[in-house]
Amino acid sequence: MASEYRAEIDRILTRELGAGSRIPLSSIPNTRDLGGYAGAENRCVKRHRLIRSGALSSLNEEDIRMLTEEYGLNTVVDFRTKAEAQEKPDTHMEGVTYISLPVLREAQLGMTHEEDPNRKISLMELVQNESTNAGQFMQKIYEALIHDEYALSQYREFFRIMRANKEGALLWHCSAGKDRAGTAAALVLEALGVERETIYRDYMLTNLYVWGRLRQMLEKAAQQVPDERVLTGIAVMNSAKREFLESVFAAIEADYGTTERFFEQKMGLDRAGLEELRENYLAPFPERAVVLQ
């Protein structure tokens, strides 16, 4: 009940105060404007500039109008693998630049056999494997985002794109907007000086918006394999759990000591670079900015 209570608090804060609020698209559940969060030096994240999302394959005309006209969207960064993007390509929006920036290779997602890269492993197969602990599996994925040089180079390029985007909205996404996009959002908010606890709370808000999709997935899985362990594994892999994101910051601190050193050494953001980023995406602190606690 405690977790349900905190989820309700998050919902109220998001609806009433607007920080990190969901963009009310009818076709995509987990698209959010990060504007409104309190950042460095009594400033807050500008609205209509930074958008985290799930895949854009099902956008309808009204949603396209909202993103391009109301939010001024000009750039989309797709963190999915090429195979994922080919299976469900983003909907084209006139005047928007699309950038493919796969953060993980297919094999790193655990979705292919190393000995046979052409054979896909379904999520059902993965969680039925007795050796698979769903939580540990997901934590390894998150840790790989920090330990793997390929993933780091892609996030570094993402920050370069951010720095170059001087006006209009930048949107980034993976499939559900939870793991790769969620880690990117956490790094962005960290770079902008948002409190760590607020970053965790923003990450956890994903559970509110993907619940309908997860429920349908669990109902379908239960019809195929009515095994509680399997269903729990599927739920874990498709949820935003605090310990997943904690493993990102733990890996950064273990490898680099501080996030500042990480940003400088791996993201190309020294002190001057961080301040440039903050000048671009932070505004004077309004009365309605919020720190989630």
Image (cartoon, rainbow, N blue to C red):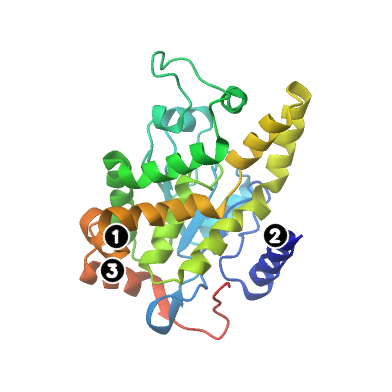
Mark 1 and mark 3 lie on one chain; the one further toward the N terminus is 1
Task: Work out which residue is located at the far bottom of the displayed protein and give it.
Answer: 287
**Residue 169: horizontal and vertical position, in percent?**
45, 60
Mark 2 and mark 3 lie on one chain; the one further toward the N terminus is 2
- Please tell me which residue is depicted at 24% across the width and 53% down the height of the picture: 266
Task: Work out which residue is located at the far front of the displayed protein and give it.
Answer: 131
- Please tell me which residue is depicted at 60% across the width and 53% down the height of the picture: 206
Q: Amino acid at mark 3?
A: Leu
Graded by Cα atoms within 10 Å as few (under 14), some (14 to 19) or many (20 or more), the crowding at tag 3 reads: some
Nearer the observer, 44 or 197: 197
- Judge whether 137 appears above or below 248 on screen: above
Q: Amino acid at mark 1?
A: Ala
The image quarter containing residue 191 is: bottom left
Nearer the observer, 239 or 167: 239
Q: Provide the residue designation for mark 2.
A: 3
Q: Relative to residue 260, is residue 45 drawn left or right?
A: right
Q: Relative to residue 63, is residue 147 drawn left or right?
A: left
Graded by Cα atoms within 10 Å as few (under 14), some (14 to 19) or many (20 or more), the crowding at tag 2 reads: few
Find numbered disc 1 in the image and state the secondary structure of the residue it sits on: helix
Q: Provide the residue designation for mark 3.
A: 274
Find residue 164 and name its label: 1
Q: Quadrant of the C terminus?
A: bottom right
Mark 2 and mark 1 lie on one chain; the one further toward the N terminus is 2
Cα distance in 3D space between marks 1 and 3: 13 Å
Find numbered disc 3 in the image and state the secondary structure of the residue it sits on: helix
- Please tell me which residue is depicted at 41% across the width and 30% down the height of the picture: 82
Find numbered disc 2 in the image and state the secondary structure of the residue it sits on: helix
